[in-house]
Image: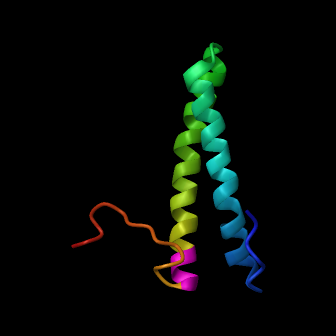
Amino acid sequence: MMNAPSGDPDRDFAAMMIPHHQGAIEMAEAELRYGKDERLRRLAQGIIVEQRQEIAVMQDILAEKTGPAAGAHHHMGDDK
């Protein structure tokens, strides 16, 4: 699903990249589940870690730009 442009290119970039990264994670998880090539499995594991970290950053940026409801993201330990 494509969000309507907000007029803020940074917000739009983050909003569009999150589902893109989620798709990459799903593909990498399928490789780990069914793949046999150890090189691709290592690559898939790295993709999962990196893409999750990048999603968290983009969600935080969206929350800053649009308020907590739009980018709802909670980090463990943030409730101090």
Residue at far front of view: 1
Query: Residue 69: where, in percent of width, then height?
Result: 48, 79
In the depicted view, which residue is nearer to us: 12 or 38?
12
Image quadrant occupied by the N terminus? bottom right
Q: Is residue 56 above or below residue 45?
A: below
Q: Residue at image x 60%, y 42%?
A: 25
In the depicted view, which residue is nearer to us: 1 or 43?
1
Q: Is residue 45 above or below residue 49?
A: above
- The answer to which image quadrant residue 31 occupies is top right
Residue at far top of view: 36
Q: Is residue 41 above or below residue 29?
A: above
Image quadrant occupied by the C terminus? bottom left
Q: Is residue 12 left or right of residue 80?
A: right
Q: Give the colouring mode of the picture.
A: rainbow
- Residue 64 colored in magenta in the image: yes
- The answer to which image quadrant residue 16 occupies is bottom right
Q: Residue at image x 62%, y 13%?
A: 36
Residue at far left of view: 80
- Main SS of the magenta part reads helix
Query: Residue 50: where, in percent of width, then height?
Result: 56, 46
In the depicted view, which residue is nearer to us: 35 or 78?
35
Query: Residue 9: where, in percent of width, then height?
Result: 76, 78
- Residue 20 colored in magenta in the image: no
Q: Is residue 76 above or below residue 42?
A: below
- Residues rendered magenta in the picture: 62-66
Q: Residue at image x 63%, y 18%?
A: 35
Query: Residue 78: where, in percent of width, then height?
Result: 30, 69
Task: Count the labels in the image.
Answer: 0
Q: Is residue 75 left or right of residue 19?
A: left
